[in-house]
Amino acid sequence: MKKNIDWSRLGFHYTETDTIVRSHYKDGRWSKPYLTQDKTINLHLSATCLHYGQEAFEGLKAFRGADGKIRIFRMNANAERLWQSAIGLAMAPVPTSLFREAVLLALSGNIDYLPPYETGATLYFRPLLIGTSPRLGVGTAQEYEFVIIPSPIGAYFKDGFRGTPFIIDRTVDRAAPLGTGRYKVGGNYAASFRATEPAHKQGLSVIFVDSVHRKYIDECGAANFFGVKDGVYITPASTSILPSITNDSLMTLCKEVGIPVERRPILVEELGDMSECGAVGTAAVIAPISLVIDPDTGRTYTFGEEPGQVSKLLYKLLQDIQYGRSEDKHGWCDVIDN
């Protein structure tokens, strides 16, 4: 039975579903994942996730396709990235088989929360991995919990596919070059709030620069950056940014349609030579950038409210694959009949 939800009013916020999925790691083994209505964790106050930051998470979506089938986009890639995050924080990694089983279980247990095709809304999954062992001395946990939190989310662009203003911030280091920036962990986001919260109050998002030279573009808030310069899709090469699954997908599509791709350090000043740029990630796919303010130089780089031609093309190409409107040549989607 479909839930009585006004899909058009959903945003990118948490909407409670019937169940979540849980699995526990103890004595060197993961338990079989199971559905539960219990959405709370009975956690010891000395748990390593609270004191020493042993926490990692992911984000992926299930789409109701034009053909009525369900598509989960690049589930294996999310499983691999969570594995790498776990290794980076010396946590017990979640095997791909367990990750997939848990996501599919979360889908089956909350199928009534999968939005209809025409709405542009999707069912979002938030996999979360935390260390639960109590410790006072610095060290890693011996026990872990893995959960999948499903939530329907609305179309990212409710008022059309339009640009967002950004500001350069050189006062905050989101992550160090050889630190945790390449992993999807909560500490990276907490470290960015000192810059992003004041910017949001001004209606702006933040572009972070590298923490060594403070002159190369790193990340757009919580997303990867790309720019188009002389017809080339350029995105930063950096050990302190998260390897975006969406960005990887877009670079693959660029090559298919003949758009050259460069992954390299990008000077902030190069924004002046770009015809368009944007932030890429799971939530928006592409969030076009309308302008970038650089308060240290007094310069503003303007790109306009309307997305550029490359942004519009790549956005359509990827959305067509996710919704089953075009062939999935790379096998990115797990297709489920329903």
Image (cartoon, rainbow, N blue to C red):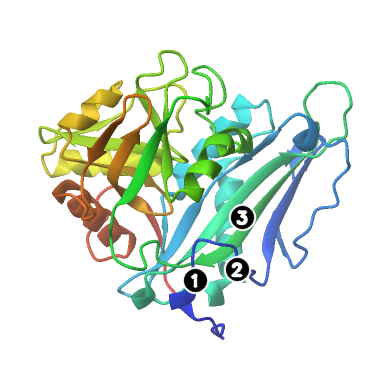
| Residues marked 3 and 2 touching at CB (< 8 Å) | no
What residue lies at 68% left-to-right and 67% top-to-bottom? Answer: 19
SS category of the residue bearing label 2: loop
Name the quadrant of the N terminus: bottom right
Q: From the viewer's perspective, is 318 left or right of 107?
A: left
Please rate how many residues cluster around mark 1, counting C-alpha atoms within 10 Å: few if below 14, some from 14 to 19, many from 20. Answer: some
* Vertical placement of residue 129 versus 7, above or below: above
- Using the rendered view, name the quadrant where residue 46 is placed: top right
* Vertical placement of residue 252 versus 6, above or below: above
What residue lies at 68% left-to-right and 52% top-to-bottom? Answer: 147
| Image x and y of residue 104, in percent | 55, 60
What residue lies at 33% left-to-right and 68% top-to-bottom? Answer: 159
Between 275 and 96, the one lying in front of the other is 275
The residue furthest top is: 213
Q: Which residue is mark 2?
A: 15
| Residues marked 1 and 2 touching at CB (< 8 Å) | yes
Q: Which residue is mark 1?
A: 10
Between 222 and 337, the one lying in front of the other is 222
Depth-wise, is mark 3 or mark 1 nearer the camera? Answer: 1
Q: Amino acid at mark 3?
A: Ala
SS category of the residue bearing label 1: loop
Name the quadrant of the C terminus: bottom left
- Using the rendered view, name the quadrant where residue 47 is placed: top right
Measured in 3D between alpha carbons, the distance from the residue under mark 3 to the one under mark 1, in whole angstroms, is 24 Å
Q: Amino acid at mark 1?
A: Leu
Residue 20 in view of the camera: yes
Q: Which residue is mark 3?
A: 102
